[in-house]
Image (spheres, rainbow, N blue to C red):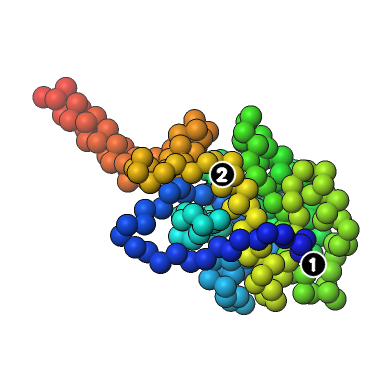
Amino acid sequence: MRLIQNMTTIAEYPAAEHSVPSRAMKIAVIGGSGVGKTALVVRFLTRRFIGDYERNAGKLYSREVQVDGEQVTIQVQDTPGAEMTDNGISLPDHVSCSIQWADAVVLVYSVTDRCSFDLIEQLHQLVVRSGGANMRPVILLANKADLLHLRRVDSEQGPLIAGNLGCSFYEVSASEDYSQVHGAFHRLCCQLAKQTPAVSNSSNNSAGVAMEKRRSPLIPRPKSPNMQDLKRRFKQALSAKVRTVTSV
Ligand SMILES: Nc1nc2c(ncn2[C@@H]2O[C@H](COP(=O)(O)OP(=O)(O)OP(=O)(O)O)[C@@H](O)[C@H]2O)c(=O)[nH]1
């Protein structure tokens, strides 16, 4: 991990009635399958490493923390793994939506998985394209640094590609080192905090809302399946009624 200077801590913030979170930060974690996305998110948010995970379908985690003395709500979207196919990259819809939704993105590959490294440039392109003129903060994590004997990506290659893409790079081990993982996410949160100055609580709202407004044209508003189902059933009922009336 790169040396982080003047690091301020993200501490869990005790929920208190008077302490309204001043903003929300939305972070999407994307990368190949099995690179440790869930392990990293869980490690960052709970300090714990849990060795066994189910293949994930994309969970959203939320936690109130302090960044540079300010209380914020961090939402971290874990996503299903992207795959490389003969026709290019295979990306679950969930990942595309998460990229559009996020204020910042964490790209992850595993040092033990060459294919996951090869995905990074394309994933980064997707992030850039979906952001339009707003370039969102992106960091690159090389995970599983503890598995030295299984390494398939040289340690120089990570910083090289990160330099080309213009993002910060951290080699980490979710299983071995909490502080590396925490440092990387924390740095990203600080970057985000600087980009969107806080609005005082007395204005009864947040820069998070401002961020939401700014990005709203990009975010597809997924229709609730229930509403769609209701509409379909309503149309069916209506056309059945029309048929009944015309046959009378
Ligand atoms: N040794 C080691 N194992 C890790 C590390 N991070 C994750 N793992 C293991 O790698 C496996 C996959 O981790 P996950 O966090 O489920 O990976 P994922 O990217 O969320 O996987 P998908 O949901 O399938 O995309 C699990 O068995 C983890 O225990 C690490 O830093 N070191």
Question: Could you say where residue 12 lies in the image, as x and y percent from the top left?
Answer: 48, 66
Query: Left of 243 or right of it: where is 132?
Result: right
Residue type pointed to by label 1:
Thr
Question: Could you say where residue 25 lies in the image, as x and y percent from the top left?
Answer: 51, 49
Query: Left of 13 or right of it: where is 149?
Result: right
Question: Could you say where residue 151 lies in the image, as x and y percent from the top left?
Answer: 84, 69
How many angstroms separate mark 2 from mark 1 (CA)?
A: 29 Å
> Where the N terminus falls, by quadrant?
bottom right
Question: Could you say where residue 111 lies in the image, as x and y percent from the top left?
Answer: 79, 64
In this rendering, the answer to whether 73 lies above or below 36 is above
In this rendering, the answer to whether 50 lies above or below 25 is below
Mark 2 secondary-structure assignment: loop
Which residue lies at the image location 86% right of the left edge and 56% below the top edge? 157
Query: How many neighbours does mark 2 have within 10 angstroms: few (below 14), some (14-19), or many (20 or more)?
Result: many
The answer to which of 60 and 8 lies nearer the viewer is 8
Which residue lies at the image location 60% right of the left edge and 75% below the top edge? 49
> Where the C terminus falls, by quadrant?
top left
User: Which residue is identified by label 1?
Assistant: 112
Which residue lies at the image location 50% right of the left edge and 33% below the top edge? 214
Q: Quadrant of residue 179?
A: bottom right
The answer to which of 28 and 138 lies nearer the viewer is 138
